[in-house]
């Protein structure tokens, strides 16, 4: 496969220090665009006649079309800082995702040039040359000098030389390493900053004939060096004044303002104020954190368990130390215990885990009056066995009688426990269970109130209560009705000789009953009038024909209601005017013959002059041969 590399626009020349230009490159293989879709990295290698110089990576994310094999080589600041005016050769190295590498072009290299700019030979900026170019020029100059020395002949005395009379250095900061700054120059050296990292130096040479020449140099700030060695210890300082707390004040405004010395202190509450340079400075609170300190009371209590020196029967010099006792242990006439057969503090499986009672003999779990039994049980945080006592006045005691017994918890986190005991007064057995935080109080049955096999309350042969026999279910009529089950009264049901209506009867009556519509669903629409509370609007639903019959008496506050709207949205989803032949809504009024009705924004609008009471509706059959008269009505789609 033959790989080619070419410029897409034949532009192969770049001006020196111009960082806005770029080289547009096309990669092809056998004459077709090289697909960069699977490329992992793209690197441009740059060399001149003396050898390899640098490489530059191409950002794959900035290639707009990976399929056409074109890339843009931006000549940026990094490239211009490295390269000088010269002719260069480039190659493009493409590493694919599978690890293979393609080098463009297959044959030779692609060349481009960096031309000098006008500043390159003005003397304002020293031209940059490569080390090889400098060595070659130096060798050429050396040869010329050697030839000139061999061929030199004494000539006439020349004119007096024009030597350097003086040299003056000036400095200026800049953000560019290539463009000579045009601002004000300083006679003293300046420190660079992050914004102005380059220091330009201008040397002004003054010659004997009065002429001058300037040369400019540029340098940049280097990276921060490593920390140097620690210097020698300085001499001890003078004795300070120290801090003197003079007193305290109730607030900052009452601190003394005269007669204070440097370092004087006053307390305002727990804040320390110090007199510094003629004013009080708040140094913050000086209250210590006492969390890690021992209280005096605790210290005294702890000391009471220690042996006082005055209590020792012999002086310390006559008491044997641990080392002496251990050394003479084998000479004492006793047999040491077998370590494998004694109980250790860490051997929790062989000693009691906790006490059943408190140290004073009181129950291990004791609930005072006003406290909650449930809180004490929930607070158990380990498995074990305790004595238990709850006063009759415990706030959640359901029996108002003292409880005594024992509590067992078999869960290491205390989420399950059971208390078994008796009520102190009645002697009834009770149990209290803590089931994962849910407390259940249980009480044993009263023996005098339960059934026995014999006696006053027994189920021996004939069940009795207080010696009265009970009626067995087997002796009841088969058709006896039960209050907890549905019963079918096929012969009818009466009360006081009058038949009782069933729920179905009531539902049927409810469906066909007239209902009153709340006046909040009625509003006037002409003249800004309002409906009076004396008005009334009733309706009845006909589910067979999807009709809503209605009638009304409407009074307005001005007694001049010309139109009003009725909102049926709480009854039906959508209403409409009947489409029956010759349908009209007639009025019960001598002033008008009929009302006009229409649907306005989903509401029924009735309008006339004036509208006060309802009337009736009339319509005919399809051939207009028969008239029908009913209450006014509208039709609906579905009920709410």
Image (tube, helix red, strand yellow):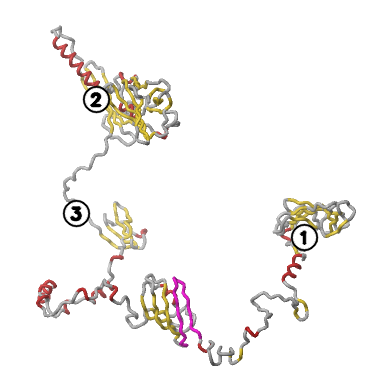
The image quadrant that residue 21 belongs to is: top left
Q: Percent from the top left, x then y, of residue 531?
A: 76, 59
Provide the residue designation for mark 1. 544
Q: Position of residue 53 (x, y in %)?
A: 29, 27
Magenta range is 426-445
Residue 435 in magenta? Answer: yes
The image position of residue 97, as x and y in percent, is: 37, 36
At horizontal 28% and vertical 57% (from top left) the residue drawn is 259
Image: 531 above or below 206: below
* Residue 613 visible, this orientation: no
Q: CA–CA distance between discs 1 and 3?
A: 111 Å
Give the total of numbered labels: 3
Q: Quadrant of the C terminus?
A: bottom right
Q: Which residue is mark 2?
A: 168
The residue located at (29%, 65%) in the rendering is: 292
- The residue pinned by badge 3 equals 239
Kindly report the secondary structure that dominates the magenta region of the rendered protein: strand
């Amino acid at each position: 496969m033959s790989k080619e590399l070419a410029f897409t626009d034949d532009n192969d020349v770049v001006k020196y220090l111009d960082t806005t230009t770029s080289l547009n490159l096309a990669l092809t293989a056998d004459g077709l665009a090289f697909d960069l879709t699977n490329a992992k990295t793209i690197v441009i290698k740059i060399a001149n006649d003396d050898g390899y110089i640098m490489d530059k990576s191409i950002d794959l994310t900035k290639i707009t079309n990976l399929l056409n094999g074109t890339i843009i080589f931006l000549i940026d600041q990094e490239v211009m800082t490295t390269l000088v005016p010269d002719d260069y050769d480039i190659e493009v190295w493409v590493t694919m995702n599978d690890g293979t590498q393609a080098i463009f072009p297959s044959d030779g290299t692609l060349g481009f040039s960096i031309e000098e700019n006008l500043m390159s030979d003005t003397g304002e900026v020293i031209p940059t040359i490569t080390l090889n170019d400098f060595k070659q020029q130096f060798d050429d100059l050396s040869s010329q000098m050697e030839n000139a020395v061999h061929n030199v002949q004494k000539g006439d005395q020349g004119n007096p030389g024009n030597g350097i009379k003086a040299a003056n250095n000036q400095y200026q900061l800049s953000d560019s390493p290539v463009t000579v700054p045009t601002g004000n120059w300083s006679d003293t050296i300046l420190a660079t900053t992050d914004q102005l990292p380059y220091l330009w130096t201008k040397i002004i040479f003054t010659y004997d004939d009065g002429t001058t020449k300037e040369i400019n140099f540029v340098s940049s700030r280097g990276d921060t060096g490593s920390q140097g060695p620690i210097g020698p210890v300085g001499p001890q300082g003078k004795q300070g004044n120290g801090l003197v707390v003079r007193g305290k004040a109730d607030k900052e405004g009452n601190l003394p303002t005269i007669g204070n010395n440097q370092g004087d202190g006053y307390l305002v509450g727990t804040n320390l104020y110090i007199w510094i340079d003629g004013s009080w400075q708040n140094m913050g609170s000086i209250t210590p954190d006492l969390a890690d300190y021992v209280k005096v009371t605790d210290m005294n209590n702890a000391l009471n368990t220690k042996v006082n020196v005055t209590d020792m029967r012999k002086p310390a010099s006559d008491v044997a130390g641990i080392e002496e006792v251990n050394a003479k242990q084998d000479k004492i006439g006793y047999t040491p215990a077998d370590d494998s057969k004694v109980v250790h503090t860490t051997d929790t499986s062989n000693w009691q885990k906790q006490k059943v009672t408190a140290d004073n003999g009181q129950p291990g779990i004791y609930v005072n009056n006003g406290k909650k039994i449930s809180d004490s049980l929930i607070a158990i945080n380990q498995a074990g066995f305790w004595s238990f006592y709850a006063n009759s006045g415990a706030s959640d005691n359901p029996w108002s009688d003292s409880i005594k017994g024992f509590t067992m918890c078999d869960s290491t986190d205390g989420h399950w426990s059971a208390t078994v005991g008796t009520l102190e007064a009645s002697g009834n057995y009770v149990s209290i269970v803590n089931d994962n935080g849910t407390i259940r109080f249980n009480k044993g049955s009263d023996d005098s109130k339960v059934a026995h096999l014999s006696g006053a309350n027994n189920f021996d042969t004939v069940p009795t209560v207080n010696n009265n026999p009970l009626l067995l279910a087997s002796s009841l009529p088969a058709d006896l009705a039960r209050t907890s089950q549905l019963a079918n009264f096929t012969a009818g049901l009466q009360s006081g000789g009058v038949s009782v209506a069933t729920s179905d009867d009531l539902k049927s009556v409810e469906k066909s009953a007239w209902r009153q519509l709340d006046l909040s669903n009625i509003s006037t629409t002409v003249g800004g009038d309002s409906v009076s509370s004396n008005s009334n609007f009733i309706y009845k639903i006909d589910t067979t024909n999807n009709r809503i019959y209605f009638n009304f008496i409407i009074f307005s506050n001005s007694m001049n209601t010309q139109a009003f709207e009725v909102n049926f949205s709480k009854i039906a989803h959508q209403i409409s005017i009947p489409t029956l032949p010759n349908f009209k809504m007639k009025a019960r009024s001598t002033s008008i013959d009929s009302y006009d009705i229409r649907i306005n924004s989903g509401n029924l609008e009735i309008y006339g002059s004036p509208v006060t009471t309802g009337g009736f509706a009339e319509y005919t059959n399809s051939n207009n041969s028969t008239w029908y008269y009913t209450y006014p009505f509208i039709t609906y789609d579905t009920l709410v």
